[in-house]
Amino acid sequence: MSEQHFLHGFLNPKKSVAFYGANNKGGSLAAIQIMDLIKSGYDGNIYPIHLKLDSVMGFKAYKSLAEIPEIPDLVIIVLPAKVVPQIFKECGEKGVKKIILISGGFRELTDDRKNSLTEEICNIADSYGMRFIGPNCLGVFNNWYHPENEYSAFNIAIWEKLKKGNFSIASQSGTLSSHIWFDPSSVDVGLSKSLSVGNEANIDIVDCLEYYKNDDQTQVIGLYIEELKRGKKFLELAKEVTSTKPIVSIYVGGTEAGNRALQSHTGSLAGNSRLYDAAFKATGIIRTDYVQEFLDVALILSNGVLLKGNRLGIITNSGGPGAMIANNAEKKGLIVPEFSKSLQIELKEHLPSNASFKNPVDCAFDMDLPYFYITLPELLMKSGEVDAIIQYGVVGFQDVLDDFLNYEKIAKSAEFTNQPVEVVDNLAKKLVIPTVQNSRKYQVPILHVSPMPFNSPWSKRLRENGFLLFRLWDRPVNALAKVYEYVSYIQKSK
Amino acid sequence: MSEQHFLHGFLNPKKSVAFYGANNKGGSLAAIQIMDLIKSGYDGNIYPIHLKLDSVMGFKAYKSLAEIPEIPDLVIIVLPAKVVPQIFKECGEKGVKKIILISGGFRELTDDRKNSLTEEICNIADSYGMRFIGPNCLGVFNNWYHPENEYSAFNIAIWEKLKKGNFSIASQSGTLSSHIWFDPSSVDVGLSKSLSVGNEANIDIVDCLEYYKNDDQTQVIGLYIEELKRGKKFLELAKEVTSTKPIVSIYVGGTEAGNRALQSHTGSLAGNSRLYDAAFKATGIIRTDYVQEFLDVALILSNGVLLKGNRLGIITNSGGPGAMIANNAEKKGLIVPEFSKSLQIELKEHLPSNASFKNPVDCAFDMDLPYFYITLPELLMKSGEVDAIIQYGVVGFQDVLDDFLNYEKIAKSAEFTNQPVEVVDNLAKKLVIPTVQNSRKYQVPILHVSPMPFNSPWSKRLRENGFLLFRLWDRPVNALAKVYEYVSYIQKSK
C-alpha cells in the first residue's frame, strides 16, 4: 500500500541520485552524505554536479544536471539558498520529480526577501509537478531498501550502519532523525525509516504519518514536532494511527526560550504547550520531553509485547534498586502490588532464607542463574498478578570470572578454567531465550537492568538474544510508565 | 584531621586483613572481594580463614583467627548470620578492633530471634571495644590508599579500577556504593571513598558524614538513605557540612511499595517522603530519585566550578537540541535569557549568515572548531550574561574523517591523509584546554554534549582533557537544575 504514496520514491530511488553541493572536502555535509550512501551499499548511480571539479568523492562529476545521461530519481541540494530557485528550474526542465533540499537560510531567517524565496521555490516545484522535502533538513534513511541485506540501506542521513527494525521517524529536527543514531552501540531500537522534514515548505509531518500508516515495515512511529501546520488533519490522522500503531512524540514549545529557539530553528511559532498536551492525550500520542526516553519508549514498543495493565513485578538480587524502582514506579502511576499468599509461598520455596518475596522479589546475592533468569520471571508472568517486570541483576559474572584468569596464581589455586566462547554463547542462549518466549506467550514485557557495561561481552550476549537491557534502573521505570499511558488510552477508547 | 576518626582505620588497614568465608569458588562474594583487593594492589597481608582448605585464592589459609601470626587491622566476615556471634568473640579475644560484617540475615528478616542476634553481636562488640560496619553491607573502597599510585586502592567492594577524585559515598544500599561503579567507561566522576553501611547496627551514616566532613580527599558527598536513625543529629551535621561540601542524596521511601521493599532490604521503616524532602531542603541537601542524576550531579559538583546563578547559555550546531534544552531548562527552574544587543552583535560578527545568536546560539552545521569550542564559550562566559553553558555539537568528525580512509577510492580522489595520533591528540588539547581554563577563570561551568559514542576516540580525547561530556542533552539540563538548587540554598543562607 505504501508503495502508492509519493514519499515511497524519496526512500527508494532505485536508479540514480544527483548531488548539488558535494566536493572533495571530507568535512562538508554533502561529502558525508555521499559517504553515507556508499557505506550503506547504494547500488544505483551517483551523479555529483560541480562547476569545476571533474571528479567528486571518486565519482565522475557533471557541470550541470542537463549533462547527466538519465533523469535522476532524486536530486539532493546542499547549496546556499539564493541559488536554489535556479537549480529547481533546472530540475524541472530535466524532468526530475523529487528533490531533497538540505540547505538552510530560508524561512528561519526573519527576512521578507527570504520568505519570498520559499514561496518562489514552492511555485517552481508546483509548476513542474515536483515534490520536495525541506528546506533546512538532514535527509532520509530507509533501512529496508534491500530487505535481504543486513546492513544495506538507502541512506543520506546517518553515519552508522543500523539494525533493521519497525520504528520509523518523522522529525522537524535533523538531530532527532539523524544524530541520535550516531552511536548504534548504545541503542537497541531497530530503525525502519527516518524522514527529516525541516521547514516543511512542501512536504510535512502529516504526509509522513500518512505514509507510515500504511507501511508494513513501520509498527511504531516517532515524531519530533515544533509546530503543526495542519493541526486538525494531524490530530484526526494521529487518532486513526494510534489505534494500531503507537506514536511517541517530542513536542517542543511553550516556554519563552523554547519558542525563541524555534523561531530561529525552523522559523515556526510554537503553540501553547498545554494545548498540545491535551490534544496529544486525546489522540493517544505518548509525549515526552526527553530524547533518551523517546528512544526507550520506542525500544519497548517495537519489541511488540505490550503490557495489559499497570501492575509491575520487580525482581532483583540487590535491595536498593528494588526499593528505588518501586518508589519511582508508584510516583509515575504504576502499581507494585504485594503478591498473593500463594505466589509468595511458591516463590519462597526456591529462594534463599534471607530473600524477600512480597514484591519486590529480592534473591539476595547468591542465586542460581537459570532460576533467576527463567524460573522467577515465569512464576510472575503466569501468576497473572503482574503486567510487566523489571529485573535488576548483577549478572556480568562470566566476564568477571574470565578476568580471574589474568591472575595466574589465583586461577591455578582456584582451579579456574577458561570457558570456550561457544560454551558461554550457549549459556546465554539457554538463559535468555526461554524468558523471551515466555514474555511473548504471557504477553508480559520484561526489562532487564545490569550495572555492567552495556557493551561487555556478557551484556552483548543478553541483548543479542533478545533481552531489553538497560544499564541503570531509572530509565526502564520511566519509559514503562509512558508506555502504560498509551495502553490505558487504548483500553479506554475500546 | 580525618585520620583521628575511627573510620579512618576501616579504609586504611596498612598491615593486614583477614577473611572469614572465602573459598576457591570464583562466583562467591568473598572470593570476588579478595580479587578486588589483589586487583587494586593491596600490599598488606591477606589471611583467609577456612576450616578445611589449606589455600584460598592463592593465599595460605588458616583454620582459625587464633593461628594467624598477627592481629589483623581489619576482619571481613561473609558467613551465615548464626555463626557470627562466635566469630565476633574470636575477634575480641584476638584483639581485633575493626570488623566489616558483609553477611545478611539479621534485622531485615522480621523474626525476633534474629533481631536479638543483632543485639547479641552489638553487645559482644561493645564488650571488646570493637567497631563494625554492617551487617548486610558490601564493604568499603578507598581510592586514596596509595595516593601516588594511579590505580591503587584499598578495595573490597568494586570490581573495576576507578579514576581518583573527590566524591565520597555513604550508602545504605550496596548497589549505590558498589555496583554503580562497575562500568568506569560510562562514568567520569572520580571516586574518593565509598562506605556501604548496611543495617547500621554499630556504625551509621552520621558517622560517615562526620568522617567525610574533615576529610580533605572528600569535597562532594553522595548519600543513599532509606532511614535515618539519628535524624536530628544527621540534619544538624548535614547543615554544617553543606556550607562547604555539597551533598547529593537519594532518599527512598514514601510509597507503599517502596516501604515494603525497604522493610525486606535493610529492615528500615521509612518515613514520610515529604518530611524528608522538607528537611533536606532546609539543610541544603540536593535530593534526587534517580541514580544517573546522582552521578551527573556528582560529576558537575566534583569538577569544582559552581554556577553563580540560574542563567543558562546554550550553544549548538543543530536547532532541535537547542530548543529542547531551552524548553526543559525553563521547566526545571533555569532561565535562558535573550542576550543583550551588544553580545548579539559580537556573536553575529563571527557566525555564518544562517546562524542564530539570541540564545540559544545555533552555529548551523558549518563552523570552525576553534571558534565553536573556544571563542563562542568565552564570549558567553566573559559577557557576564550567563552562569552556565550547555554546548551541543556534532563533533566526532575526526573519527568520521578517519573512516573515509577505509574507502580507498574516495580517500584518493578526495586526497585525504591519515592524521597521526599525536596530531589529533594535540588538536584535542588545543581545542579543549583553553575552554576548561576559561570555565575556571570566569567560574562558569560548561557541559558538553555529543551524539557520538561516549568512548569513541574523539570523545575520549575531549573527556581526558577535562570536558564534562554527555551523549545526549537531557541529563545535563536536569543535573544542572539540581546543582542550582544547592547554589540557591547557599546564597540564601549567607
Image (tube, coloured by chain):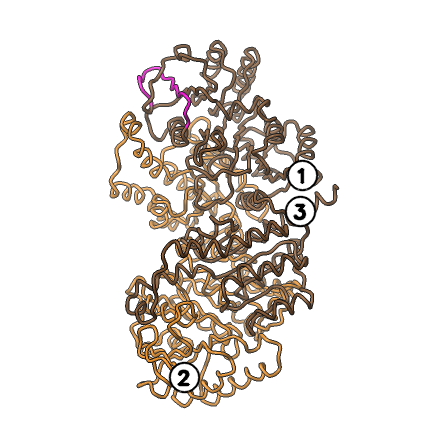
Chain colours: A orange, B brown
Check residue A220 for magenta coloring: no
Q: Quadrant of residue A212?
A: bottom left
Q: Secondary structure at mark 3?
A: helix
Residue B10 coordinates in the image, percent (x, y): 51, 24
* Camera-nearest residue between B223 and A142: B223
Q: Residue at x 51, y 37 (%)?
A: B191
Which residue was labeled with disc 3? B485
Mark 1 = which residue? B280
State the image coordinates of residue B253 (x, y, percent, origin top left).
60, 37
Where is residue A41, by image quadrant? bottom left
- Magenta stretch: give its range: B42-56
Q: Are the residues at dot 2 and dot 1 in contact (C-beta closer than 8 Å)? A: no
Q: Which mark is residue B456?
A: none
Query: Given the image, on which type of amino acid does mark 1 rest?
Result: Phe
Disc 2 to disc 3, C-alpha distance = 55 Å
Label 3 amino acid? Glu
Q: How far separated are the C-alphas under marks 2 and 1?
A: 63 Å
From where the camera sits, is residue A305 visible?
Answer: no
What numbered label is drawn on residue A97? 2
Q: Amino acid at mark 2?
A: Lys
